[in-house]
Image: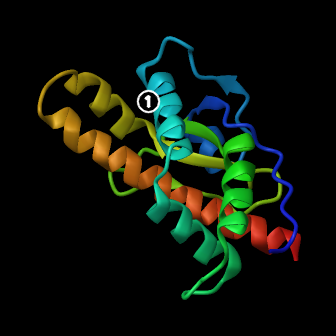
Amino acid sequence: MSHLNPTSSGELFTVDAGDFYRNVVPTTPLNSSHAFCKFWREFLAKLSNGCDPFWDAMMRIYTGQSGFAGNRSEIERFKAIFLRSPPNVAIADMQSLTLYGRHKRLPRLWGFIFISKFFVDEWVAAGDDIAAIGYEALLKATIVHEAAHWAQTLVSLSV
């Protein structure tokens, strides 16, 4: 495994549409009482307790080997790096219903994954309704997808 040195820390931000499309680095923290803060903490906690298919997929992306058959210590090393320095997340007003998330491969933004404000807002508004389950699944899938792009960027930047 090549050397990884992510500088992100899993912080949560918000970004408006103008700054999102101008590729401005997010600096406005997400309000700590926002429901997504708890969602993000719980998501990371679940990843720290197993989720072997997730870690196996991340290692395949990281190593570029579709048939990754690394040993457990390599997976545990990657897992520790990811959990110690997860991507920063910015809830972004993407002004589009076709964008769920985005990872921008720009040097100043590589440590961020962007999640659609629209779908976060819809999840929050759904509350305890059955629709919330669908939005939660969408948010989790988006985070995993964008985290995979983040992991691939780590590889690209460390070569």
The picture places residue 81, in percent across and down from the top left corner, at: 75, 51
Q: Position of residue 15 (x, y in %)?
A: 60, 33
Q: Nearer the viewer, residue 110 or 16?
A: 110
Residue 153 percent location from the top left of the image = 72, 67
Residue drawn 51% across the image and 24% down it: 37
Measuring 48% from the left and 56% from the top, which residue is drawn there?
144
Q: Is residue 148 above or below residue 19?
A: below
Q: Depth check: 142 or 50 in front?
A: 50
In percent of the image, x 39 and y 47: which residue is there? 140
Image position of 108 (left or right of 66): right
Please determine whether, in this image, residue 122 is positioned above or below residue 150: above
Q: Left or right: where does residue 74 sit relative to residue 141?
A: right
Bin the neighbour count of mark 1 within 10 Å (Cα to Cα): few under 14, some 14-19, many 20 and up: some
The residue indicated by pointer 1 is 39
Q: Residue furthest front?
A: 72
Amino acid at the residue labelled 1: Phe
Residue 61: x and y in percent read 61, 75
Residue 111: tell me if it is visible. Answer: no
> Residue lying furthest top in this view?
33
The count of marks equals: 1
Location of residue 32 (image quadrant)? top right
In the picture, the quarter occupied by the N terminus is bottom right
**Quarter assignment of residue 127:** top left
The answer to whether 24 appears left or right of 143 in the picture is right
6 or 118, which is in the foreground?
A: 6
